[in-house]
Image: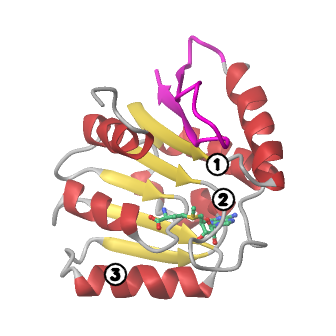
Amino acid sequence: MNLEGILPFARTLLNTAASEGSAVIDATCGNGNDTLFLSRLVGVSGRVFGFDIQELAIQNTTRRLLEEHAFDNVTLFQAGHHTMKSAIPVHYHGTVAAAIFNLGYLPGGNKEIVTQSDSTIEALEQLFDLLATGGIAVLVIYHGHEQGKKERDAVLEYTRQLDQQKAHVLQYGFINQKNNPPFIVAIEKR
Ligand code: SAM
C-alpha cells in the first residue's frame, strides 16, 4: 500500500513538527511505544513529558525505556493529561513542538479504563497554551468501543469549531475499511 497507515502517519506528523532538542508530550503513555519514539526523536538535548493515569502503564513505559536504553530525557507523570499545564514547568510553556494522544484503553490492560472525552478536551485546551507556533497535536481515535464513539463525536465537535485563524485541523483515515478503524485528528497551532 502506498497510502500511509494510521500509526505511521501519526509518526510522520510528529517527525515533521519535532526534532533534536524539542520538548514534546506523550499524553497517553500506555506501554511506552510512543514515549520511546519521542525520546529517540528529540534526543538527549530534548525533553519528553509523559502522562498516564494507570500505575501499570507508567511501569510498562519505564521498563520499555530502560530495556531500549532510551536517553535520560523523559519525565513521566502518573496523572491525567488534563493536569499537563500545571505538571509541565512554566519555562516550557509555548515551546512544545508536538504531542500525541493515543486514545482508548491500555493494550493488554483493563479495557474498562479508557480515555474520556471531557478530560481529553480539557487536555487539548491546556495543550494549546503549551504548544509553540507550528506545534502539532496528533490524536489517534479508536471508536470501536462504546466510550470511544462518544469520545470521537466530542473530539470532532470540539476540533471542528476551533478558529481557523488559530489552528489548522486535519482528519486522516481510511473510509472504506470495516470494523471502525482508528483515524487521526491533528491540530497545528498557527
Ligand atoms: N501510546 C500508548 C503506547 O504506545 O503503548 C498506548 C496508549 S493506550 C491506547 C491509552 C492509554 O491512555 C491507557 O494506558 C490509559 O491508561 C491512558 N489514559 C486513560 N485516561 C487517561 C487520562 N485522563 N490521562 C492520561 N492517560 C489516560
Residue 79 x, y percent position in the rendering: 63, 74
Which quarter of the figure has residue 70?
bottom left
Q: Is residue 190 above or below residue 95?
A: above
The answer to whether residue 15 is left or right of residue 91 is left
Task: Indicate the quadrant containing the N terminus: top left, top right, bottom left or bottom right.
Answer: top left
Tell which of 53 and 173 is nearer to you.
173
- Residue type, numbered disc 3: Arg
Q: Which mark is residue 64?
A: 3
Residue that badge 1 annotates: 142
**Ligand 1 falls in which quarter?**
bottom right
Q: Residue at x 41, y 46 (%)?
A: 7
Callout 2: helix, strand or loop?
loop
> Magenta stretch containing residue 123, yes or no?
no
Residue 184 x, y percent position in the rendering: 53, 36
Q: Is residue 39 above or below residue 186?
A: below
Whether the residue carrying mark 1 lies under 8 Å from ligand 1 is answered with yes
- Residue type, numbered disc 2: Gly
The answer to whether residue 103 is left or right of residue 14 is right
- Residue type, numbered disc 1: Tyr
**Classed neighbour count for the residue bearing mark 2: other residues with Cα under 10 Å, few (<14), some (14–19), many (≥20):** many
**Start and end of the magenta stretch?**
163-190
Residue 117 x, y percent position in the rendering: 78, 49
Q: Earlier in the sequence, mark 2 or mark 3?
A: 3
Residue that badge 2 annotates: 104
Q: Residue at x 52, y 71 (%)?
A: 30
Picture colour scheme: secondary structure
Tell which of 83 and 28 is nearer to you.
28
